[in-house]
Image: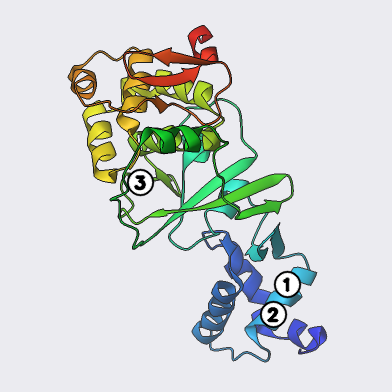
Amino acid sequence: MVPPNRMRKSPLTATLPHYLASLSPKVYTCPELCSIIRDFAKAINNPLDAEPDDYLQHYVKLRKINSIELSGAKGAIQRYALHNPSPLEVGQQLKKGGYFSHQTAAYIHGLVDEETITYYVSTEASSNISNGYELNQQAIDTAFGKEQRKSGAAYQWENYQFILLTSLDRGKMGVEKKGPYAVTGLERTLLDITVRPAYCGGAKKILQAYNKVLPYICVRTLVKMLDKMDFTYPYHQSLGFYLSRAGYTGQELKKLSRRRRPFTFYIDYAIKDPVYSGDWNLFYPNALDNLV
């Protein structure tokens, strides 16, 4: 490593911090920042007298760049910030091609009131698994009688937790830009939290989200998106239940009600004090009956 006093005498060292401060986004990987340092040196015709990483670590010591380490069971993730970043800014740089989903998306869209300390970042991956699974009632009862399985890719930074999720490749269906962030849109967010209730605090919070968002969504788009996702489980029953409880009475609800419902389903996993809905042939928590 080049001695710090040598770098302090370099014109690059004096001008580079001002250049970095002008950049956006504000959170980077080590290779990204090293590439920026190398390109800047070429642009001002000032050859590097040290490796880009030496400059990076020098600025970290001077506290002109913040070193961010997220710790997790699968190891650590290192990032660098040019200011004091928000958890959303950190989260959006954790995975290439990632986007905010589930409760984080619901929070960004204003569907949940309380600020979260858990952030969900999704990416997509291709799969060779066929959706030709033969569904039966016993399999449904067994799966939904247990707690929902959760991602093991959890990372901690300060008081915040980041959960990295991987879903089937659907071409980022329903993902949009909201400000600087890639995030699932309203309809996709509703479907994601309907399918994975634990990633939004359970059925009560999900119904509250439906109540809030109903005037602003296209239910036809919501149903079409559900069909394109081609889930194994009969989530049209969950969707119909939530829509009807939120006060929707349109044609799409009537179409959902005409679909076959040969299996008794569950709106959530490991439901305590379940209540049966004959209209949708599913069980739901009795707390939903008291929701105003």
Q: Earlier in the sequence, mark 3 or mark 2?
A: 2
Measured along the vertical axis of the image, is residue 291 above or below residue 201? above
Q: Nearer the viewer, mark 3 or mark 2?
A: 3
Q: Specify the amino acid type for callout 2.
A: Tyr
Q: Quadrant of residue 215?
A: top left
Q: Are marks 1 and 2 in contact (CB under 8 Å)?
A: yes
Which is nearer the eye, 164 or 68? 164
Determine the residue positioned at 38% across, 32% down: 137
Label disc, if present, on residue 86 of the rendered structure: none
Measured along the vertical axis of the image, is residue 244 above or below residue 128? above
Which is nearer the eye, 117 or 9? 117
Q: CA distance from mark 1 to mark 3?
A: 35 Å
Colour scheme? rainbow
Measured along the vertical axis of the image, is residue 99 above or below residue 210? below
Mark 2 residue element: helix
Q: Residue 292: tell me if it is visible.
A: no
Residue bearing the label numbered 1: 59
Mark 3 residue element: strand
Q: Specify the amino acid type for callout 1.
A: Tyr
Q: CA distance from mark 1 to mark 2?
A: 6 Å
Q: Residue 59: tell me if it is visible.
A: yes
Please give left or right for residue 69 compared with residue 33 in the image: right
Q: Earlier in the sequence, mark 1 or mark 3?
A: 1
Q: Position of residue 22 (x, y in %)?
A: 56, 62
Label disc, if present, on residue 55 of the rendered structure: 2
Which is nearer the eye, 236 or 47? 236
Measured along the vertical axis of the image, is residue 149 above or below residue 267? below
Sort mark 2 into few (<14), some (14-19) or many (20+) by Cα contacts within 10 Å.
many
Q: Position of residue 13 (x, y in %)?
A: 69, 79
Residue bearing the label numbered 3: 176
Q: CA distance from mark 3 to mark 2?
A: 36 Å
Sort mark 3 into few (<14), some (14-19) or many (20+) by Cα contacts within 10 Å.
some
